[in-house]
Amino acid sequence: MEKMSVGVIGATGMVGQNYLRLLKDHPWFEVTYVAASPRSAGKTYAEAVAGRWVTDEDIPSAVAGLIVGDAGNIEEAEGKCELVFSAVDMDKQAVRELEEAYAGNDIPVISNNSAHRWTEDVPMFIPEINPHHTDIIPFQRQNRGWNKGLIAVKPNCSLQSYLPAVYPLMAAGYAVESIFVATLQGVSGAGYPGPASIDMIDNIVPFIGGEEKKTEQEPWKILGSIADGKLVNDDSITIAAHCNRVAVTDGHTACVSLQFKAQKPSLDEIVAIWRAFEGEPQQLDLPSAPKPCIIYREEQDRPQPRKDRDAGKAMAISVGRLRECPLFDIRFVALSHNTVRGAAGGAILSAELLKAKGYL
Ligand code: NAP
């Protein structure tokens, strides 16, 4: 199969670097274009990230010499790529307009930015949970007069550590009433250079701007349905979140207590449901789909960020410490890699889903 040429806008940032690393040997996609702010434009990619290349692997040789484009100048991308992954960090209105301009120029956009997360005809994917939301794309194209263009987004990284563990229980018929979640989020979630080291070492910061609202409300869209050409939220689950920044490089951990609406599965049944869970990405054998999707750890002190964040090429969700909860019904700990599953890897999986369904 001939590879699809793709661009990464915001390629010099934390998430952008992870895109380049993950796309290095991708069987379907090949990076042919990189862009960032005017500060980086005109330099080779290697020059633009000098001193701030933060991932452990070297810069992929195929992109090191690419000249960085200005992400704001769409003409530069035309003819160079058939799709862009967007990891730009800019003012939300500017991101909305920029992503719409790419899509309007026949360049589909898969975005990590929050700008379009609440746009009614834009799907927000965790591909194992809501693969059917691809059905909104024909409405999106019709609404906007787009032919090949589309916009699809990823949710906030915090909820990708726990929602993929909650959803299989719902899919098995156990409706969820409410969730209490305390997150322990790695510093890479704040981009590079992130919080000052002096604020993080020997410390926990119990505030991440806007994060609690995102982790409480974005699940409503992901769990929602399509009606009259729009995505309709399902806000029947009440979620209360405490989001904390901790001195961990990569990996978001979530301590979850959960209450079911009526019927409650046994602990053994829950573990069995997690272990058997397969979403459409696994069934379609998409290249980035982790198998298994959920790894249940029996050890009493797992999951841990350093030991478990890279499970399933950093795309699996690691879960452990399932036990009864004296306040709610059950409690457990879940973990995912925030810049891979929670950002670049999750977006690549979304693009694979859209391609497998013929939208790209
Ligand atoms: P980052 O490390 O700060 O990188 C920001 C990127 O945006 C850089 O490539 C930067 O280019 C570019 N940029 C900034 N201003 C621009 C402008 N005016 N025009 C064009 N490009 C511009 O941020 P990040 O952590 O990679 O996050 C990127 C996006 O993903 C954000 O929206 C973030 O909320 C979201 N996200 C992040 C994570 C995570 O775990 N880090 C997870 C999920 C979602 P220069 O290098 O040239 O300045």
Image (spheres, rainbow, N blue to C red):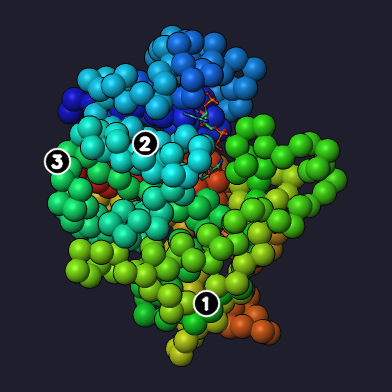
Q: Nearer the viewer, residue 104 or 189?
A: 104
Residue drawn at (47%, 34%) of the image:
88
Disc 1 residue crowd, few under 14, some 14–19, many 20+, Cα 10 Å: some
Viewer-nearest of discs 3 and 1: 3
**Eyeballing the image, is 76 above or below 226?**
above
- Given residues 220 and 141, the one toward you in this image is 141
Amino acid found under the numbered disc labelled 1: Thr
For badge 2, the amino acid type reads Leu
Does the Cβ of the disc 3 residue fall within 8 Å of ligand 1? no
User: Where, by quadrant of the figure, is residue 351 drawn?
Assistant: top left
As drawn, 93 above or below 21? below
Q: Is residue 52 left or right of residue 71?
A: right
- Quarter-wise, where is residue 26 in the image? top left
Where does residue 101 sit, x and y in percent of width and height?
A: 30, 36
Identify the residue at horizontal 67%, vertical 64% (top origin): 242
Please tell me which of labels 1 and 2 falls first in the chain: 2
Residue at 28% x, 57% y is 121
Residue occupied by mark 2: 98
Q: Which residue is mark 1?
A: 238
What is the CA distance from the residue labelled 3 to the residue labelled 1? 38 Å
Q: Is residue 298 left or right of residue 289?
A: right
Q: Quadrant of the N terminus?
A: top left
CB of residue at label 2: within 8 Å of ligand 1?
A: yes
Disc 1 on helix, strand or loop?
strand
Q: Tell me the amino acid under the disc marked 3.
A: Asn
Q: Circle 2 — which element?
A: helix
Q: Nearer the viewer, mark 1 or mark 2?
A: 2
Task: Residue lying at the far bottom in this picture: please name it.
Answer: 262
User: Which residue is labeled 3 in the image?
Assistant: 147
